[in-house]
Amino acid sequence: MVKILPDVGHKKLYLSAGMTDESVALLYCICEGEISTEFLESDEDITPIALNKEDAQKLLNSEEKFDIKLYMVLQSFVNGEFDEIL
């Protein structure tokens, strides 16, 4: 990670507000280097991918199943909401 983008994310968000007290932090950052799954825990199923705006739009238009949080983040990226701070 090269830089965490200030004033974009949030320190404490609830995944299922009212149903659980499980919370996460959401941050946006600029990264460089190689994508790796080397340090995943045995019960994690995470597939990291790097997307440019064109690829992100293709994913949004596809029939691929993914969660609503990813959909919202990709739409923000494609629509240029972070262009000024990137």
Image (spheres, rainbow, N blue to C red):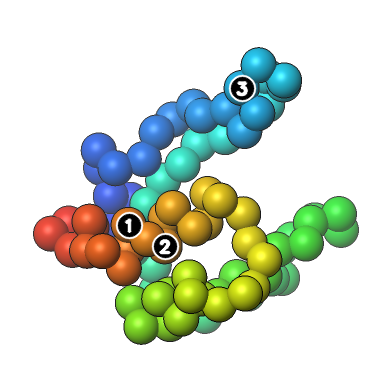
Residue 61 screen position, x and y as percent: 48, 75
Residue 19 screen position, x and y as percent: 72, 20
Residue under numbered circle 2: 74
The local crowd at label 1, few if under 14, some if 14 to 19, many if 20 or more residues have their Cα within 10 Å, is: few
Q: Residue at x 25, y 38 (%)?
A: 7
Residue 59 screen position, x and y as percent: 51, 76
Residue 17 screen position, x and y as percent: 61, 22
**Total label count?**
3
Residue 52 can be seen, yes or no: no
Residue under numbered circle 1: 76
In the displayed image of the protein, which residue is found farthest to the right? Answer: 42
Q: CA distance from mark 3 to mark 1?
A: 23 Å
Mark 3 vs mark 2: which is more N-terminal? 3
Report the side of 82 relative to 36 (left or right).
left
Q: Residue at x 48, y 70 (%)?
A: 60
Residue 69 can be seen, yes or no: yes
Q: CA distance from mark 3 to mark 2?
A: 22 Å
Picture disc at residue 55: none
Determine whether label 3 and label 2 are within 8 Å by CB: no
Mark 1: amino acid? Ser
Q: In this picture, is 9 found above or below 45? A: above
Determine whether label 3 and label 1 are within 8 Å by CB: no
Report the side of 23 relative to 12 (left or right).
right
